[in-house]
């Protein structure tokens, strides 16, 4: 029987080589995961100077019943020009911490692009609406 340091004849770990099957230069790139970089919410308080309080609503499954429940959270966001009022919908972008509680920047939402298919459907019907008939008569 060969002389080993282990009981059942296994080889010491120093003799085992590391797996060399991993490619040296991987051809694929996995982007880093950045969670919650941008969020949307409604301004609930704008009394402070250069600061707005934004309430973000998200849907999260209930831990026991698995039904989706609305979860609300308030964030403090930086508003340098004091342009947002209560009720405005804004987008929060992550930034470096501005103060103890502010690490988001409030940005106005870009305007929504109208769906061109809806316009085509309304024009293709061919039947004028009642409001259009009143204008023609």
Image (cartoon, rainbow, N blue to C red):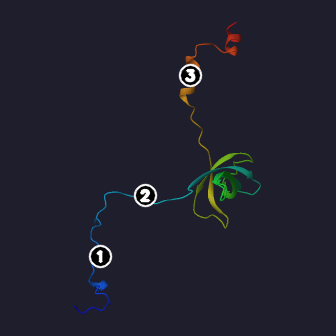
Residue found at x 59% / y 21%: 122
Separation of marks 3 and 2 at Cα, in angstroms: 41 Å
Q: Which quadrant does the N terminus fall into?
A: bottom left
Residue 22 percent across, percent down from the top left: 30, 66
Please tell me whether mark 3 or mark 1 is closer to you in this view: 1
The image position of residue 68, as x and y in percent, is 65, 51
Give the crowd class for mark 2: few <14, some 14-19, many >=20 residues within 10 Å. few
- Judge left or right: residue 30 versus residue 3: right
Q: Which residue is mark 1?
A: 18
Secondary element at image label 1: loop
Residue 19 image offset from top left, x and y in percent? 29, 72
Q: Depth check: 10 or 100 in front? A: 10
Label 3 sits on residue: 121
The residue at which mark 2 appears reads as 31
Residue at x-position 43% and y-position 58%: 31
Q: CA distance from mark 2 to mark 1?
A: 27 Å
Label whose residue precedes the other's in the sequence (3 or 1): 1
Number of dots carrying numbers: 3
Instruction: Kindly state the secondary structure of the residue where label 2 is placed.
Output: loop
How far apart, in angstroms, are the residues tagged by discs 3 and 1? 64 Å
Q: Residue at x 55, y 56 (%)?
A: 37
Q: Which mark is residue 53?
A: none
Q: Residues within 10 Å of mark 3 (few under 14, many from 20)?
A: few
Q: Outermost residue, top direction?
A: 137
Disc 1 packing (10 Å; few <14; some 14–19; many ≥20): few
Query: Residue 86 at x, y = what percent?
Result: 75, 48
Precedes in sequence: disc 3 or disc 2: 2
Question: At numbered mark 3, what does the secondary structure look like: helix, strand or loop?
Answer: helix
């Amino acid at each position: 029987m060969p002389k080993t340091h282990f009981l059942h004849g296994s080889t010491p770990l120093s003799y085992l080589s590391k797996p060399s099957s991993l490619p040296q230069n991987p051809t694929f790139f996995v982007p880093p995961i950045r969670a919650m970089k941008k969020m949307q919410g409604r301004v609930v308080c704008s009394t402070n100077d250069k600061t707005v309080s934004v309430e973000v609503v998200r849907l999260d499954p209930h831990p026991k019943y698995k039904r989706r429940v609305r979860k609300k959270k308030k964030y403090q966001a930086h508003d340098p020009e004091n342009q947002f009022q209560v009720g405005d919908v804004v987008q929060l972008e992550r930034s470096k911490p501005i103060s103890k509680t502010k690490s988001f920047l409030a940005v106005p939402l870009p305007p929504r692009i109208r769906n061109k298919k809806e316009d085509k459907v309304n024009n293709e019907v061919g039947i004028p609406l009642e409001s259009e008939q009143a204008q023609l008569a």
